[in-house]
Structure formats: structure tokens, C-alpha cells
Image (spheres, rainbow, N blue to C red):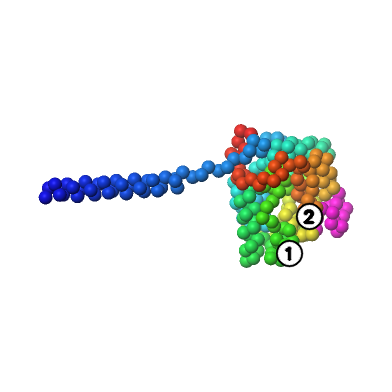
């Protein structure tokens, strides 16, 4: 009887140990989180190339057409391919001599952020930011009208959303989630108080008034758009005609590669 009890005890101990080992083996893969991808060496933080260029990285905040921080934007840092960053620096030097500065809203954009935009656009119930960013566009038309797509040139690393600020720059006050919205094409004094010069619409305004050469944009607003396009065009940037703020450096180092590393300083650490 004593040997039988001992045998049972040993058998129970072995079973417990085996089960515990199985749990550890099963848990091991989950505990080893896959490391985040890093940017190739050809990418840099814009601030390391030109710290004078102002940055207002909208997708790390709730002040954008989605109404919340966008997937993949971990820190408010502008990341670009090295040639695009150096070309921006050259444009900035010219503008500084004229009493202006560039200000970027968005630079490299991970594919996961584009996927976030796509999910949001398909959810027709979520119109929390409609009044400001797409007041005259039915949300069901965002894909058909070209405002949202499943791929973005930003993910290739040489596209930037940018504006011009008159110096000395007046700080832009923080956005307060839930505050009263004003249409993005309203007069500048009524829109959200961006410190940009008057471009006729705010950034990311889903409206034909955002077309760079829309004939309704006249006088100082047209002159401001031309100031931006000429400064960047001289350095190899090509404007997207539907968005006065959208420019792509040519030739692109990665013309057909869409990256998905996060927007964070660690992505370009040591570059």
C-alpha cells in the first residue's frame, strides 16, 4: 500500500510538471512579441536635417478628419527619405530669406495608418468631424471622389503635406476634442486658428476649393499657394493638383514600396 501511494504521488508530480512545461512552451511564442520594423537607412527625421522647419503633426492628435490619433503615429515626428528632407531644407532656406517658414502636417505615413483611414471611410455612421473636414461631401463618396484610397504615396516616404507660415510664427493653440467645428473653407478668421498664411482652405479640406488652381481662389490666397508651389517646385517637388498642401519629391528613392514602420523616433534612431 505504501508503494502504491508513493507511485500515485510520483505520477501526480510528473503529470503536474509535464502540464506546467506544456503551458510554458505554449506561452513562449506569445511572450516573444514580434519586434517593430525599422526604417531603412535612407530615412531620416526631418528635424535632424533642418530643425527650423515647423511641425504640426496632425495625425498624432484628434484634430483630423478621423477625429482620433491614427494607427501607427506614435510620436509627432516628421520622417522622410533623405533626399526629400534635404530638398525641403533647400526650400526652407529660400523662404526664410523672404520672411517665411515651411510647416509640415504629415510626412511618411505607415500603411497601417492608411488602413485606418479605409476602415473609417467604410463606417458611414462615424461623421464626428464632417462639419470641419468634408461638409459638402457625402461620406459614401470618399472613395469614388478620390479623397480616400487603399494606398498612399506618403507610405513611400517622399511625400509631404506642407504649408507656409509668416515669421515670426504665432503658436497654434491646442485643439480641444469636441470643440465647435467650423467648415474648412470658411474665412480664415473663422476657421480653426492655424498659424499658416491664408491658403483659402484649411489642411485636409475635402472640397474642390482645395484644388491648387481652383479659379475661385484669388488675390492673397492664390499668391500664397504660388509661393508654396514655386518654393518646393524649384527643389524637385511635384504638387498634387487636388490638394494645395500635397507634394512629392522626384525622383523617389522608393517609387513602388509601401512601408509600415511606425512614426516614432526609434524608427530612424542612428540614421
Residue 214 magenta-drawn? yes
Total marks shown come to 2
Chain-order first, disc 1 or disc 2: 1
Q: Residue at x 72, y 54 (%)?
A: 204
Image coordinates of residue 215 in percent, x first then y, are: 87, 57
Residue placed furthest toward the top: 270
* Residue at position x 84%, y 57% in the image: 214
> Looking at the image, which is closer to me, 209 or 13?
13
> What residue did someone put label 2 on?
242
- Residue 20 on the magenta span: no
Find disc 1 in the rendering and name its residue. Answer: 137
10 Å neighbourhood of mark 1: few (<14), some, or many (≥20)?
Answer: some
Callout 1 secondary element:
loop
| Residue 209 vertical placement versus 55 (above, below) | below
Q: Quadrant of residue 117?
A: bottom right
Of residues 225 and 146, the one nearer the viewer is 146
Circle 2 SS class: loop
**Residue lying at 37% horizontally and 46% vertically, measured from the top left:** 24
Segment colored magenta: 209-223
Q: Quadrant of the C terminus?
A: top right
Q: Could you tell me if residue 235 is visible in this image? A: yes
Q: Are marks 1 and 2 in contact (CB under 8 Å)?
A: no
Which quadrant of the view contains residue 269?
A: top right
> x, y percentage for residue 158?
72, 43
Q: Nearer the viewer, mark 1 or mark 2?
A: 2
Horizontal and vertical percent for residue 52? 73, 37
The quarter of the picture where residue 265 lies is: top right
Q: Is residue 208 left or right of residue 264?
A: right
| Direction left: furthest residue | 1
Name the mark on residue 21. Answer: none
Reply above or below: 30 against 266: below
Amino acid at each position: 500500500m505504501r508503494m502504491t501511494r508513493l507511485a500515485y504521488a510520483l505520477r501526480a508530480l510528473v503529470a503536474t510538471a509535464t502540464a506546467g512545461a506544456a503551458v510554458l512552451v505554449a506561452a513562449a511564442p506569445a511572450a516573444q512579441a514580434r519586434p517593430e520594423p525599422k526604417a531603412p537607412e535612407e530615412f531620416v527625421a526631418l528635424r535632424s536635417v533642418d530643425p527650423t522647419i515647423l511641425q504640426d503633426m496632425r495625425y498624432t492628435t484628434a484634430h483630423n478628419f478621423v477625429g482620433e490619433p491614427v494607427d501607427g503615429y506614435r510620436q509627432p515626428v516628421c520622417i522622410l527619405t533623405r533626399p526629400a528632407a534635404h530638398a525641403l531644407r533647400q526650400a526652407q532656406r529660400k523662404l526664410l530669406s523672404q520672411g517665411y517658414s515651411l510647416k509640415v502636417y504629415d510626412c511618411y505615413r505607415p500603411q497601417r495608418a492608411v488602413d485606418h483611414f479605409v476602415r473609417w471611410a467604410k463606417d458611414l455612421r462615424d461623421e464626428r468631424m464632417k462639419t470641419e473636414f468634408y461638409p459638402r461631401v457625402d461620406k459614401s463618396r470618399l472613395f469614388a471622389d478620390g479623397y480616400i484610397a487603399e494606398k498612399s504615396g506618403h507610405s513611400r516616404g517622399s511625400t509631404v503635406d506642407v504649408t507656409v507660415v509668416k515669421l515670426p510664427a504665432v503658436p497654434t493653440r491646442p485643439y480641444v476634442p469636441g470643440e465647435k467645428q467650423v467648415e474648412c473653407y470658411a474665412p480664415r478668421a473663422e476657421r480653426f486658428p492655424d498659424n499658416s498664411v491664408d491658403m483659402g482652405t484649411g489642411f485636409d479640406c475635402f472640397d474642390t476649393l482645395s484644388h491648387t488652381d481652383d479659379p475661385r481662389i484669388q488675390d492673397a490666397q492664390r499668391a500664397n499657394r504660388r509661393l508654396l508651389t514655386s518654393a518646393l517646385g524649384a527643389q524637385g517637388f511635384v504638387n498634387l493638383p487636388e490638394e494645395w498642401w500635397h507634394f512629392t519629391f522626384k525622383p523617389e528613392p522608393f517609387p513602388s514600396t509601401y512601408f509600415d514602420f511606425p512614426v516614432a523616433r526609434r524608427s530612424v534612431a542612428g540614421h
